[in-house]
Amino acid sequence: MKLDQRISDANSKKWLSVRGDSKLFYLDFKDLATIINNNWDIFKDYFPSQDFIIPKIKEMADCRNLIAHNSLIDETERNVIKTS
């Protein structure tokens, strides 16, 4: 599993600070969509529908990746972030 591999990799690099004691700290942003989808009974009171929130998270993740990799974000991406 990707999560277990990330934790193992982090533990093997003692010179890096610890991400935290929760597995949530080792997830990709897009993984949040999977968590919400797989646990909809827990999240259904917080979002209008899965069809609404899952694409929004994926759009925000794409914008986040641009920022994290020092790419330019234009007005379109800024609007995605503002409206999400």
Image: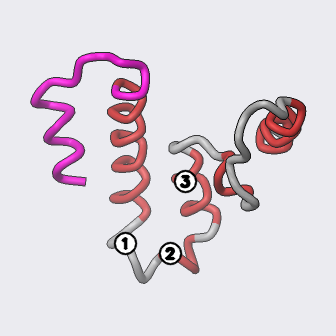
Amino acid at the residue labelled 3? Leu
List the residue tagged with mark 1.
Answer: 47
Please tell me which residue is depicted at 64% across the width and 62% down the height of the picture.
38
Q: Position of residue 55 (x, y in %)?
A: 38, 47
Residue at far bottom of view = 45
> What kind of element bears circle 2?
helix
User: Which stretch appears magenta?
Assistant: 67-84
Calculate the distance from the C-alpha at mark 3 to the C-alpha at mark 2: 11 Å
Q: Is residue 69 magenta?
A: yes
List the residue tagged with mark 2.
Answer: 43
Q: Is residue 64 magenta?
A: no
In the rendered structure, the answer to whether residue 68 lies left or right of residue 15 reads: left
Q: Position of residue 46 (x, y in %)?
A: 39, 77
The residue nearer to you, when weighing 11 against 33, is: 11
> What kind of element bears circle 3?
helix
Callout 2: few (<14), some (14-19), or many (20+) C-alpha neighbours within 10 Å? some
The residue nearer to you, when weighing 13 against 48, is: 13
Q: Quadrant of residue 35?
A: bottom right
Most common SS among magenta residues:
helix
